[in-house]
Image (cartoon, rainbow, N blue to C red):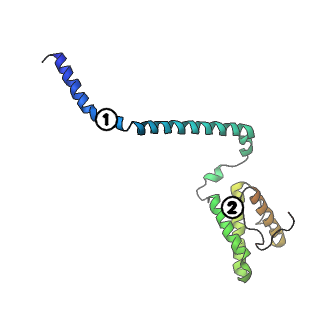
C-alpha cells in the first residue's frame, strides 16, 4: 500500500467518524443559530445597559452623591439587610398601632423594639436620629421626624394612626 492509498483510507475513516456529528449539526442547525443569535442579543442588551448606566452616572454625578456614604457599614457581618429591617418596622408598627387592648409593659416593649429598628434603618441609610437621647413627647416628635425621613428615603411605614385619614392634603 503506497502513501496515497493510506492517506485516502485515513480520510475515509475520518469522514465516517465525523458523519454523525455533521448530521447532528445539520438537524440542530436552527437550535445552534438560535442560541448564537440569543447570546448576541443578550450581549448587545447588556452593553447598551452598561452605556446607559454610565451616561446616567455622569448626568447625575452619582459619585458626588455617594461620596459621604460609608460603604464599610454594608460589609459588616452582623448587619441585617434593609428589607428585613423594613419588614420588622412594618410588623412592629402594626403592633404599636393595635396596642389598645395590651398591657403597658407589652406596649413599652413594642415601642422600644420599634425605635431600635428605626435606629438600625437610620444607620443603614445614613440618617441622623436622636431617639435614644429623648423621652416622652420629644421622643414621639423625633419618631415622627425619623419616620418622615425614612419615608422620603423610600421606606414606607404604617401611619401613626391607622384609622385617622388626613383631611387636608
Q: Position of residue 85 (x, y in %)?
A: 65, 62
| Residue 82 sits in quarter | bottom right
The front one of 128 and 99 is 99
> How many numbered discs sit on the rendered protein?
2
Quadrant including the C terminus: bottom right
Q: Is residue 35 above or below residue 102?
A: above
Q: Is residue 25 above or below residue 75?
A: above
Q: Position of residue 136 (x, y in %)?
A: 82, 73
Residue at x 71%, y 42% (from the top left corner): 62
| Residue 64 sits in quarter | top right
Upstream in sequence: badge 1 or badge 2: 1
Left or right of residue 142, residue 125 in this image: left
Q: What residue is shown with label 1?
A: 23
Q: Is residue 1 above or below residue 56?
A: above
Q: Position of residue 160 (x, y in %)?
A: 78, 70
Q: Position of residue 105 (x, y in %)?
A: 71, 80
- What secondary structure is marked by label 1? helix
Residue at x 68%, y 56% (from the top left corner): 124
Crowding at mark 1 (Cα within 10 Å: few <14, some 14-19, many 20+): few
Which mark identifies residue 115? Answer: none
Residue at x 64%, y 50% (from the top left corner): 72
| Residue lying furthest right | 168
Left or right of residue 160, residue 121 in this image: left
Distance of mark 1 from mark 2, alpha carbons? 63 Å
Residue at x 61%, y 54% (from the top left corner): 76
Which mark identifies residue 120? Answer: 2
Amino acid at each position: 500500500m503506497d502513501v496515497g492509498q493510506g492517506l485516502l483510507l485515513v480520510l475515509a475513516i475520518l469522514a465516517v467518524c465525523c458523519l454523525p456529528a455533521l448530521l447532528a449539526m445539520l438537524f440542530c442547525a436552527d437550535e445552534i443559530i438560535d442560541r448564537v443569535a440569543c447570546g448576541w442579543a443578550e450581549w448587545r442588551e447588556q452593553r447598551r445597559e452598561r452605556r446607559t448606566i454610565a451616561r446616567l452616572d455622569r448626568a447625575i454625578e452619582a459619585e458626588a452623591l455617594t461620596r459621604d456614604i460609608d460603604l464599610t457599614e454594608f460589609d459588616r457581618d452582623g448587619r441585617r439587610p434593609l428589607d428585613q429591617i423594613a419588614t420588622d418596622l412594618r410588623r412592629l408598627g402594626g403592633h404599636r398601632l393595635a396596642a389598645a387592648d395590651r398591657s403597658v409593659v407589652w406596649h413599652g416593649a413594642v415601642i422600644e423594639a420599634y425605635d431600635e429598628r428605626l435606629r438600625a434603618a437610620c444607620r443603614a441609610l445614613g440618617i441622623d436620629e436622636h431617639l435614644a437621647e429623648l423621652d416622652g413627647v420629644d421622643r414621639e416628635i423625633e419618631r415622627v421626624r425619623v419616620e418622615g425621613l425614612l419615608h422620603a428615603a423610600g421606606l414606607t411605614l404604617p401611619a401613626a394612626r391607622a384609622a385617622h385619614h388626613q383631611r387636608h392634603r
